[in-house]
């Protein structure tokens, strides 16, 4: 754009102060001020529809914010303005590449490189950029072309930065090589906050909070207006549970970029860090401004549930209402299992157990990886209600479909459900046997298997003492801590009486062992009538 065009553009916008340049728009994009950048690009392409550069970078802007279709439109426009313009040729092929026809686009890129004798750094850089950022990446080829750019222009800072990005994207093990390229860029401009932030991100990837934080602070110092330095620093702090520091960084970010989009990113970061009470005011503000989508609704109803320490039922009602609003706009393939789980938890707080269970089953149905967890949640609800038939149904399903996910406490509750519910002592014995195999040091497993076998051995005229081994195993499994706690006192008395009776009445009569067992009973309960009667006799 020549000086006359710039002058006319300034007049057209009202004053020189209103004139926007492509550099301004690109800078705002880099600073994540997307709302303002979009408006500036729109003004630029309207004021100078014959500018290949304006249309090309407007396309790049749309690609940055993941609006691919709009990006393709702008690149096609850039390619149609001047068929001989090299950047326009790249733009036309880039549109094809992002549309999915990568073979045709790549062939056109090769022809353009041949046509420019591999000596045009702009062509090489923008083709490398396409391979590095397109839906189907070709990082190796991007690396080759970027090294060509650097050979032609050793002071091309952007090429060093993108090369570092490409190397890192190829493999995490390339971190040192990527850092080398970022350092090459910093040798050209030591005060590039964008490059310093990239170095910080490398430290963050290897969980080095101290060095990452130092680099982010350095970026903020060299350019206090570079907003991403504060956002990235905030997310680092969230990652390491430094929530006060994270919020401070976000507040600085919002001073530079106070848009609904920025607050949305802020809320998303806090949500990821489970700072639900801080999420609510951010989401409520942007929704009031009309910024609403699937994810704001999800954050809102999750956070309303979590940020309710007082257990306010009205808050749960509000959370349920927002979850209904979420389901109204959510496509089926966008619903995740935790959406149903949270609805289940809300219903649980409202005392609607049947609906709670219904939601947990929905959650289990769409996420096999977490299905066992949701079945466990359902089982807990049935256990609280002592609904033994339903509890048996759930645990049977879990044990059949996800046997490796069964826990000791679940086998314990499962066996007791058979014992107290249908009084199926054979199944109770079987399930407690699984518990013993799963956790042989847990005394309760041996004890309850013994009880189940006592019920199976219910013929007083032909008693076979099926539970002898299990009661012995129970007593052997008790630790010093178990004995000292007194929590197993009644169980020890029961086991000792059973074994005492065994050594008195079974074919294996043994007075010494019988005395020992009945003495144990008296030690624990000196007034036990049966033990006194034994010794009196």
Image (cartoon, grey):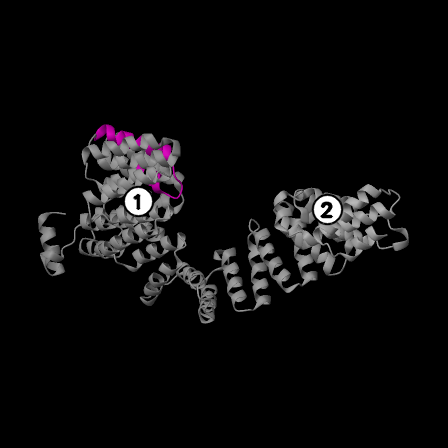
The residue sitting at 35% across, 38% down in the picture is 208
- Residue 105 appears in which quarter of the rendering? top left
Point out the stretch of residues depicted in magenta.
Answer: 127-153
In the picture, measured across the screen, residue 11 lies left or right of residue 121, that is left
Farthest residue, direction bottom: 314
Between 95 and 301, the one lying in front of the other is 301
In the image, 234 versus 332, the foreground residue is: 234
Does residue 507 sit above or below 529 in this rendering?
Answer: above
Q: Residue at x 28, y 39 (%)?
A: 126
Mark 2 Cα shell of 10 Å, populated few (<14), some (14-19), many (≥20): many
Residue 478: image location, x then y, percent: 66, 44
- Is-magenta flag for residue 348? no
Residue 421: x percent and y percent? Answer: 73, 61
Disc 1 and disc 2: Cα gap in Å? Answer: 70 Å
State whether residue 448 appears in this view. Answer: no
Residue 222: quadrant of the picture: top left
| Picture disc at residue 92 | 1
Q: Residue at x 32, y 30 (%)?
A: 177
User: Could you tell which of marks 1 and 2 lies nearer the N-terminus?
Assistant: 1
Would residue 143 be counted in the magenta stretch?
yes
Task: Where is residue 152? Give x, y as percent.
Answer: 22, 29
Instruction: Looking at the picture, tell me which residue is in the foreground, 397 or 121.
Output: 397
Q: Dot 1 surroundings within 10 Å: few (below 14), some, or many (20 or more)?
A: many
Q: What residue did someone put label 2 on?
A: 433
**Foreground of the two, 528 or 63:** 528
Kindly report the secondary structure that dominates the magenta region of the rendered protein: helix
Q: Nearer the viewer, mark 1 or mark 2?
A: 2
Horizontal arrangement in the rendering, residue 19 relative to residue 344 (left or right): left
Q: Secondary structure at mark 1?
A: helix
């Amino acid at each position: 754009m020549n000086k006359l065009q710039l002058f006319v553009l300034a007049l057209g916008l009202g004053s020189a102060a209103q004139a926007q340049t492509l550099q301004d728009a690109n800078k705002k994009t880099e600073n994540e001020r997307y709302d303002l950048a979009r408006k500036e690009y729109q003004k630029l392409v309207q004021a100078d529809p014959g500018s290949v550069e304006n249309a090309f970078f407007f396309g790049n802007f749309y690609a940055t914010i993941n609006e691919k279709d709009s990006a393709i439109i702008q690149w096609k426009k850039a390619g149609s303005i001047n068929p001989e313009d090299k950047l326009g040729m790249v733009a036309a092929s880039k549109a094809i590449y992002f549309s999915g026809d990568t073979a045709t686009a790549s062939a056109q890129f090769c022809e353009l490189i041949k046509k420019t004798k591999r000596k045009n750094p702009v062509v090489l850089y923008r083709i490398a950029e396409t391979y590095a950022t397109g839906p189907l990446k070709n990082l190796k080829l991007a690396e080759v072309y970027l090294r060509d750019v650097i050979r032609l222009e050793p002071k091309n800072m952007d090429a060093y930065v993108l090369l570092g990005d490409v190397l890192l994207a190829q493999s995490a093990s390339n971190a040192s090589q990527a850092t080398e390229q970022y350092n090459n860029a910093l040798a050209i401009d030591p005060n590039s906050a964008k490059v310093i932030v990239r170095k910080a991100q490398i430290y963050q990837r290897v969980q080095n909070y101290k060095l990452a934080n130092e680099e982010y602070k350095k970026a903020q110092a060299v350019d206090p207006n570079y907003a991403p330095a504060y956002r990235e620093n905030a997310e680092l702090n969230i990652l390491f549970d430094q929530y006060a520091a994270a919020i401070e960084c976000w507040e600085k970010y919002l001073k530079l970029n106070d848009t609904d989009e920025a607050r949305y990113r802020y809320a998303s970061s806090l949500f990821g860090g489970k700072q639900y009470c801080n999420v609510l005011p951010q989401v409520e503000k942007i929704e009031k401004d009309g910024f609403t989508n699937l994810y704001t609704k999800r954050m809102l109803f999750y956070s309303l549930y979590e940020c309710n320490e007082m257990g306010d039922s009205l808050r749960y009602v509000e959370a349920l209402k927002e979850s209904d609003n979420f389901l109204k706009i959510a496509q089926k393939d966008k619903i995740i299992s935790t959406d149903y789980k949270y609805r289940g938890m809300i219903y649980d707080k409202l005392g609607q157990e049947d609906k709670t269970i219904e939601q947990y089953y929905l959650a289990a149905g769409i996420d096999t990886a977490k299905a066992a967890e949701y079945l466990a949640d359902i089982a807990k609800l049935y256990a609280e209600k002592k609904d033994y038939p339903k509890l048996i149904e759930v645990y049977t399903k879990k044990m059949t479909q996800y046997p490796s996910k069964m826990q000791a406490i679940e086998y314990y509750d499962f066996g007791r459900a058979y014992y107290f519910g249908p009084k199926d002592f054979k199944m109770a014995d079987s399930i407690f046997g699984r518990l013993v195999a799963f956790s042989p040091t847990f005394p309760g497993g041996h004890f309850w298997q013994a009880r189940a076998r006592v019920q199976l051995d219910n013929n007083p005229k032909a008693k076979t003492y099926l539970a002898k081994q299990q009661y012995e195993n129970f007593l052997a499994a008790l630790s010093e801590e178990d004995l000292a706690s007194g929590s197993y006192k009644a169980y020890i008395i029961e086991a000792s009486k059973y074994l005492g009776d065994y050594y008195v009445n079974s074919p294996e009569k043994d007075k010494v062992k019988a005395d020992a067992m009945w003495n144990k009973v008296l030690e624990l309960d000196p007034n036990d009538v049966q033990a006194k009667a034994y010794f009196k006799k």
